[in-house]
Amino acid sequence: MDLNIAVLIDGDNIPSAYVKEMMAEIAKYGNPTIKRIYGDWTNPRLGKWKNVLLENAITPIQQYGYTSGKNATDSAMIIDAMDILYSGKVNGFCIVSSDSDFTRLATRLREAGMQVIGMGEKKTPKPFIVACDRFIYIEILKAQSEEALGTNQSENVPESNVDKITPKDIRLIASTIDDVADDDGWAFLGDVGSLLQKRHPNFDSRNYGFQKLTPLMSAIKNFELDRREDSRGRNKLVYVKVKEKKSSHSRKK
C-alpha cells in the first residue's frame, strides 16, 4: 500500500535548485498529499523558491523571524507536523532539511508509527540521519538527474565509482550478509538491502555512483552473486555471498 506522505520543507535550509528531483524521489515512496514549505517570505533570499512553488503545488507557510536565528521556522514546522500527525490523514512524513533540530521530531513521528523519510545535503548531522527510516542526500539526486539528461542509464557504471567504496563499507555489507545468510552463506539480496537500510538510513547505492544495489555488489570483488529463478520460473532472484578468503596454505604450490 502506498504511503500518504506529508512533505515539510525547511525553506531556510534547502536550496530551491533541488525541488524537481526531490519531488520525483518522494513520489517513489508514496503520494505526497500535503506539501508545505516554511520560511520568512519577506526575505529576498527565498525569492528563488517562489518561482517553483506553483509548479510543484507546494504551499508556502509564512514564519516571521521574530528573533535572530532560525528557531521560528523550525518551531512552525514541528507544530504543524504534530497537528498533521494527530489529524490521521497521513501515514508517512518527509522532512526536508539539513538541520539537526528535527532529530527529536523524526524520532517522535516514528514512535507514533509513521514512516519517516529524511532529505538533506551531505552536511546533515548524523543524529538527524539515524532518526529517520531512510535518509537521501539531495546532491545525489541532482547528480543523477544531470547524468540522465546527458547519457542513457545502464548497469555498466564506470570503474572509477568503485573507488568510493571504503573498507568500512565492505565490512558493513559483509556483516549484514552474514546476519541474514543461510547455512551455506547465501543471502537474498532484498533482505540484505532491507537490513542495511534499517541499520544505516543513509545507505544508498547511488552514493557510490550505482543506480541499484545489484551492480554495486557486482563491482565489489569481496562478494559473489547468484541469480536464481523463483518457484514459478518467471523472475530472477539475486543472492549474494561473502567470498571465502584463500588461506596462505592454499596459495602455496
Image (cartoon, helix red, strand yellow):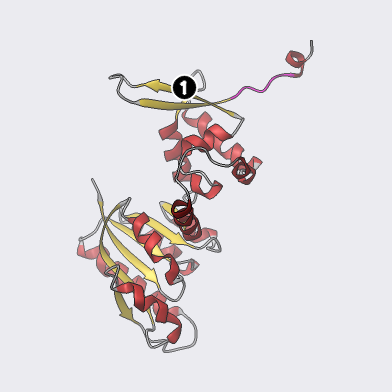
Instruction: Give the structural element (helix, strand or loop) at label 1.
Output: loop
**Dominant secondary structure of the residues highlighted in magenta in the image:** loop
Crowd class of label 1 (few under 14; some 14 to 19; many from 20; radius 10 Å): few
**Residue under the image location 52 percent in, 63 percent down:** 124
Where is residue 21? Give x, y as percent.
Answer: 40, 59
Where is residue 58? Give x, y as percent.
Answer: 29, 70
Q: Amino acid at mark 1?
A: Asp
What residue occupies the far right of the structure in this picture? Answer: 253
Could you say which quadrant of the image residue 229 lies in?
A: top left
What residue is pinned by disc 1? 182
> Which of the pair 68/156 is nearer the observer?
156
**Residue under the image location 46 percent in, 80 percent down:** 70
Quarter of the image with the N terminus is top left
Q: Can you say whether 185 is above or below 47 in the image?
A: above
Quarter of the image with the C terminus is top right
Where is residue 32? Give x, y as percent.
Answer: 27, 60
Q: Can you say whether 51 is above or below 242 in the image?
A: below
> Which of the pair 20/110 is nearer the observer?
20
Q: Which residues are magenta?
A: 243-247
